[in-house]
Amino acid sequence: MSETLSPLDEAGIRGAVAEAQTAFTAATTHEELKAARAAHIGDSAPITLANAQIRHLEKKDKPTAGKLLGAARKEIMAAFNAATERVDAAELERALATETVDVTVPVSAAPRGARHPLTTLANDIEDFFISMGWDIAEGPEIEHEWFNFDSLNFGPDHPARQMQDTFYVQGVETVGAKEGHGEPGAPTSSLEETEHLVLRTHTSPVQSRSLLSRGVPLYIACPGKVFRTDALDATHTPVFHQVEALAVDEGLTMAHLKGTLDHFARTMFGPDAKTRLRPSYFPFTEPSAEMDLWFPQKAGGPGWIEWGGCGMVNPAVLANNGIDPTRYTGFAFGMGIERTLMLRNSIADMRDMVEGDVRFSTQFGTTGRGI
Ligand code: PHE
């Protein structure tokens, strides 16, 4: 800094103001602004130093000097404030431009998993039955032949027992039964524990286990894995899921069966869905029916499509499981959960559901439960 500016040097003061204005106008960053501020407003700035000289002036000159420097300071501060605003805005603009997120850049974060839609559908199905006050029952996947077939009135020569449908199990020491051990009519001691075991071919053995362990009145549903010796293709898989429903009480009729099926169809497929029954045969129901489903959103247009099997519990099954068939009647139905998901979500290929590609599951939402 050269000579100290006199507080009465009007031209010099105006010059200092002009210099300060130029410096602030030229500043484009906060750093430059800070330096200009130190030079023109700081302790050693010409105006500040001149201000400090006022007290050495003669009394008569003090007001003039005070006015001059006060006005100068005001102008300099205005220039500084304007520059600060401008630089703030420019820096923000720069930050926004340089810190833009490119959403197309691939990320290396570990991908999130997703609940499988079969799991969420099975949960929804359980919720449906629980909402009617029914219980959820379970049974083992490695099942005794007696529960899978005999107790359900399959004759010894029934074709479903043949090797082409059923996986027989060897060398397993215990049956992982969760319910119904030691009940009347169960496997006799003459059978080896490791013999006559199958991978259950349907969830219907849980009918027998529940009748034996829980008694009547009985209202249970059982979603679970079942196994058949099918090759994997677009419409078959050797491991799939069914849901079994069984109600046994006094006075139950086919009207209760039909009403429950329609209610289930509406819950799963929307308020316009309905069911119809076609005569059929299962050893464990009499009469038996194939159950068809109608719903407006069916792939290929609204129409009837087979959804599951059902019927009135065969009195022989009640008797096999210790229930008096002259007093109690019941109805049962069962359907594939994969099939239900395929119908509901128009999935054309069964393999999509078993291959474990997370991209399949995420289409249904990572944790979602809705349709
Ligand atoms: N268990 C039968 C099947 O696997 C379905 C069914 C269940 C039929 C209950 C009638 C009653 O095809």
Image (cartoon, grey):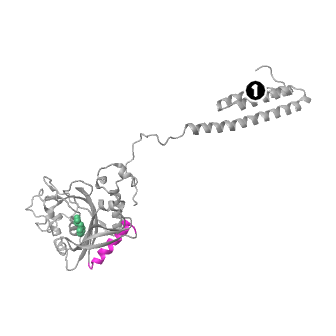
Q: How many marks?
A: 1
Quick check: is 26 in the magenta stretch? no
Task: Residue type at mark 1: give it.
Answer: Ala
Given residues 226 and 184, the one toward you in this image is: 226
Q: Position of residue 220 (x, y in %)?
A: 28, 68
Q: Position of residue 253 (x, y in %)?
A: 27, 78
- Which residue does the image show at 75% across and 31% down from the upper left? 21
Part of the protein shown in magenta: 250-270
Spot the residue most to the front. 300
- Which residue does the image show at 35% across and 49% down from the upper left? 358
Using the rendered image of the protein, determine whether residue 122 is visible from the camera's viewpoint.
no
Disc 1 element: loop
User: Looking at the figure, which quarter contains the C terminus?
Assistant: bottom left
Spot the residue most to the right. 60
Q: Position of residue 219 (x, y in %)?
A: 29, 70
Examine the image and state in which quarter residue 62 appears.
top right
Mark 1 = which residue? 45
Examine the image and state in which quarter residue 255 appears.
bottom left
Given residues 362 and 314, the one toward you in this image is: 362
Given residues 208 and 253, the one toward you in this image is: 253
Taking the image in four quarters, ligand 1 sits in the one at bottom left
- Which residue does the image show at 30% across and 61% down from the upper left? 339
Using the rendered image of the protein, determine whether residue 68 is visible from the camera's viewpoint.
yes
Q: In this image, 3 relative to 320: left or right? A: right
Dominant secondary structure, magenta: helix
User: Looking at the figure, which quarter contains the N terminus?
Assistant: top right
Q: In this image, 242 relative to 38: left or right? A: left
